[in-house]
Image (tube, rainbow, N blue to C red):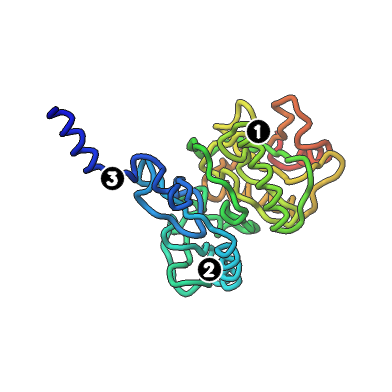
Amino acid sequence: MLAFLVLAVLSLAVPSYGLDDSGCAALGGTCTDYRYTTCKAGYVTNKCAGDTYRRCCLNCDATCQALESSYATYDSSCAASGGTCKVTSNYCSGSYVSGKCGGPSDRKCCVPSSGGGGSNSIGLSYSSCAGVNMVLRDGWGARPPKYTNAMHTPVSQVFIHHTTGSACYDQDRCSSLIRSHQNYHMDSNGWADIGYNFLIGEDGRVYEGRGFDRQGGHTQGYNSVSIAVSFVGDYTSRLPNQAALNAAKAIIDCGVQLGKVTSGYRLKGHRDVGSTACPGDTLYSHIRTWSHYS
């Protein structure tokens, strides 16, 4: 009887939220590691099971999405400083700065700290890299990863891939295609995230996949010792345009500059180490002329 009373008292003393994700679900939100995904409507703490990094991302409904789009038209000052505008309950690897973003007062510019700060690769900055027009994960609407494995850098190998399928020539179309590739990798293949470290659109932009600091899922047997740069589209019978080729070289050079890729790295096509036609006959012939190909 005494044991029953003790258990009853303890059950009253323990809050229902935080033991599982029901508190977040009751708000219509989703529990995720807030370091890796920007939540447009903001995060709420103490509604999710797990460690302190796992927080409740509130749902951004149609009204929220429309407001966010209108706010974004005033975000150019933040973008020019290499930052990202978001509600301040989101993770920021550097510091929040006021007066650079559209929208309410709690929507501020997250400016990466010196040498650091992407939405995916925490503590890493691309803003100092010449020729890199980077779209971070939240910029193309990435899903949070199921889990992550840290990459030991610098890596000494770079693999070139192509996604196959349609190419893209503007950020909206590239983002849509990359989301579909991520969905396929995660839902059909059962992978933790989109497989590539970076993707290249024929809009000349670099799209952050797993970044420099996380192991990819792209080249069997080499994922822990290499990065993969994948061109969006099928390059069996044609080359990517010059803007895309330049962007691919720029992100590799950026990796060298940031100490994530060795200066004497070896470049290969996916087919060099696997039974595949990737990255397409025409693109493969072209990368064999690049100085680090071996």
- In front here: 173 or 284? 173
Q: Is residue 255 above or below residue 7?
A: below
Q: Earlier in the sequence, mark 3 or mark 2?
A: 3
Tell me the crowding category of disc 1: few under 14, some 14 to 19, or many 20 or more residues within 10 angstroms, Cα based: few
Q: Earlier in the sequence, mark 3 or mark 1?
A: 3
Left or right, 279 with respect to 208, comes to right
Residue at label 3? 15
Instruction: Indicate the position of residue 40 as horizontal and vertical percent values.
Output: 52, 59
> Viewer-nearest of labels 3 and 2?
3
Which residue shows up at 61% across the image and 37% down it? 186
Question: What mark, if any, has residue 78 been given in the picture?
Answer: 2
- In front here: 294 or 178? 178
Between the residue at mark 3 and the residue at mark 2, the CA separation in whole angstroms equals 40 Å
What amino acid does circle 1 point to? Ser
Left or right, 108 with respect to 226, comes to left
What amino acid does circle 3 point to? Pro
